[in-house]
Image (cartoon, helix red, strand yellow):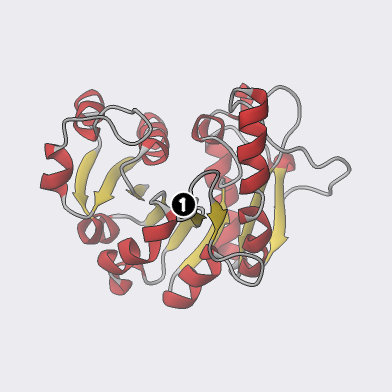
């Protein structure tokens, strides 16, 4: 399958690398490929520039958002939540129409410093905003409640733990569950929360996730919903 991963940060690199390892055709989308490749310093989190990553993953190509979206049969949004709508606008509604878009982004708001708050929150969500902005796209919120390494290797966390899916299209959620299975998530671990409005809840897990990260001193943890009826 052809995947377009939108966003060049550590989440995008982790998802793209895993998909390529699994044998899929993968491109990464960015606003300006030449400017992105010209970066020589680490990102805000200390990760090396994308050019170094691409040199080690020669099967993955870097394209503009629009070219990546046109290439992908399915898309994964890993851009920063504050700029996700602008990135998807650059990708183009026509290039997104009719396709599955797995939205991993969180609407973190750093305007008041750290830890960040959320915007939107409670009465709306980034997942809903994306679905409203691109009604022809099948948006599914998933994987936004854990570290990138856990997303693609759930066995990093001992014992049972869960991944949530939220979206209006049942077929798109089924495809997302199959996508998750390739990463090692069992059907029993998937909890279908319902339509895209339920993304409000999964996005609101981020403040407690960030506090847990600080308290535990590592990110190899996840949420386990005891007694849940699982299997999307």
Above or below residue 108? Residue 92 is below
Quarter-of-image position of residue 188: top right
Q: Position of residue 110 (x, y in %)?
A: 46, 51
Above or below residue 59? Residue 227 is below
| 15 vs 22, nearest the viewer | 15
Residue 175 visible from this viewpoint: no
Q: Which residue is drawn at 51% across and 44% down?
A: 114
Decide if residue 39 is on the left or right side of residue 198: left
Q: Which residue is drawn at 70% across and 56% down?
A: 192
Above or below residue 9? Residue 131 is below
Q: Which residue is drawn at 26% across and 66% down?
A: 90
Decide if residue 104 is on the left or right side of residue 219: left
Q: Which residue lies furthest to the right in this view?
A: 227
Mark 1 neighbour density, 10 Å: few (under 14) some (14–19) many (20 or more): few
Q: Position of residue 45 (x, y in %)?
A: 38, 32
**Residue at the disc numbered 1:** 110
Q: Where is residue 147 in the image (x, y as percent from the top left)?
A: 54, 35
Above or below residue 198? Residue 80 is above
Decide if residue 96 is on the left or right side of residue 117: left
Q: Which residue is drawn at 21% across and 30% down?
A: 41
């Amino acid at each position: 399958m052809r995947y377009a991963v939108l966003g060049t940060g550590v989440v995008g690199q982790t998802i793209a690398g895993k998909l390529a390892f699994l044998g899929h055709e993968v491109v990464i989308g960015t606003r300006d490929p030449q400017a992105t490749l010209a970066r020589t310093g680490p990102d805000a989190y200390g990760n090396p520039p994308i050019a170094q990553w691409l040199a080690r993953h020669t099967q993955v190509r870097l394209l503009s958002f629009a070219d990546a979206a046109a290439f992908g049969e399915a898309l994964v949004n890993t851009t920063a939540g504050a700029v996700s709508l602008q990135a998807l606008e650059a990708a183009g509604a026509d290039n997104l129409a009719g396709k599955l878009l797995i939205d991993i982004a969180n609407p973190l708001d750093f305007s008041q410093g750290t830890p960040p708050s959320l915007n939107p929150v409670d009465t709306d969500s980034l997942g809903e905003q994306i679905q409203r902005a691109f009604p022809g796209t099948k948006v599914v919120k998933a994987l936004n409640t854990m570290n990138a390494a856990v997303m693609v290797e759930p066995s990093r966390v001992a014992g049972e733990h869960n991944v949530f899916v939220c979206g209006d299209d049942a077929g798109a959620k089924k495809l997302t569950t199959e996508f998750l299975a390739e990463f090692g998530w069992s059907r029993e671990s998937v909890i279908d929360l319902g339509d895209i409005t339920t993304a409000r809840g999964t996005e609101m897990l981020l403040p407690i996730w960030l506090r847990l990260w600080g308290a535990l001193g590592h990110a190899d943890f996840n949420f386990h919903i005891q007694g849940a009826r699982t299997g999307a």
